[in-house]
Amino acid sequence: AQSVSQHNHHVILSEAASLELGCNYSYGGTVNLFWYVQYPGQHLQLLLKYFSGDPLVKGIKGFEAEFIKSKFSFNLRKPSVQWSDTAEYFCAVTLYNQGGKLIFGQGTELSVKP
Amino acid sequence: DGGITQSPKYLFRKEGQNVTLSCEQNLNHDAMYWYRQDPGQGLRLIYYSQIVNDFQKGDIAEGYSVSREKKESFPLTVTSAQKNPTAFYLCASSVRDSLNTEAFFGQGTRLTVV
């Protein structure tokens, strides 16, 4: 079965540190890729998405992600985190022609210390 | 404004009772989805529907039931057969079966069994 794996369950960083959250998926066909964020007590929000084209995708709040097809990876990065980035981050994929049916990773909880 | 409305935001249920979670969308989307979120497990698909009067089981359908009598509505019933119903439930919708599409999420319902 197709799956999505996020490497880190909980990441703790100090403000201004750089962030990279790993995401790998297991599916050999065409995929759409997403990163969602859930701030404490809030609903799920889309950070960025990749459908096709430039594999380096820029999202909201200074986040970016790079799709490396050969590695089945879609890692999320931010050069300098802020305390307000404290949240849970989810990587997700949809398979070709399955519309919005998402397969999610387990989530990574990010804590940023001021 | 277009969007997805889930109600109620918080729901308490006694053991042995069925409870129905509401999900309504005015995005004119054909496809709708129900996910369950548990700590450390990401979001898992319960049921989805690509068109009115049709729906399919997701990965964790046992103990749940749905209906899709109207395009705008996709209620989820958590039955007494669901062994561990306390969770955060998210509804989503999308364009049906399109390659480059994304799902839009409601704000969720937190169900607690007391």
Image: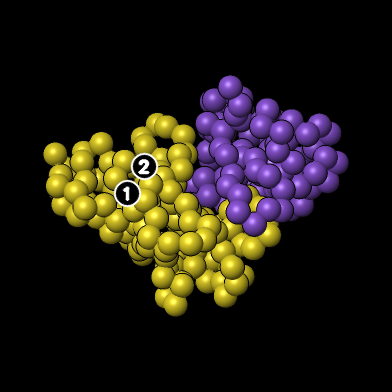
Q: Are marks 2 and 1 on the same chain?
A: yes
Toward the viewer: A48 or B38? A48
Q: Residues within 10 Å of mark 2 (few under 14, many from 20)?
A: few
Please indicate, yes or no, whether residue B86 appears anywhere in the rendered image.
no
Provide the chain ID for the residue under circle 1: A
Are circles 2 and 1 on residues that touch, CB within 8 Å?
A: yes
Q: Residue B11, located in which quarter of the rendered image? A: top right
Q: Residue at x 49, y 68 (%)?
A: A25
- Horizontal side of A48 relative to A76 (left or right) equals right
Residue B112 in the image, given as x and y percentages of width and height: 54, 32
Which residue is labeled 2 in the image?
A60
- What colour do you see for chain B? purple
Circle 1 residues within 10 Å: few <14, some 14–19, many ≥20: some
At which x and y percent is residue B67? 79, 38
Residue type highlighted by circle 1 = Phe
Give the residue at the far front of this rendering.
A53
Q: Position of residue B100 (x, y in %)?
A: 60, 54
How far from the left and from the top, in percent, is residue B103? 59, 44
Residue denoted by label 1:
A63
Tell me if residue B67 can be seen: yes
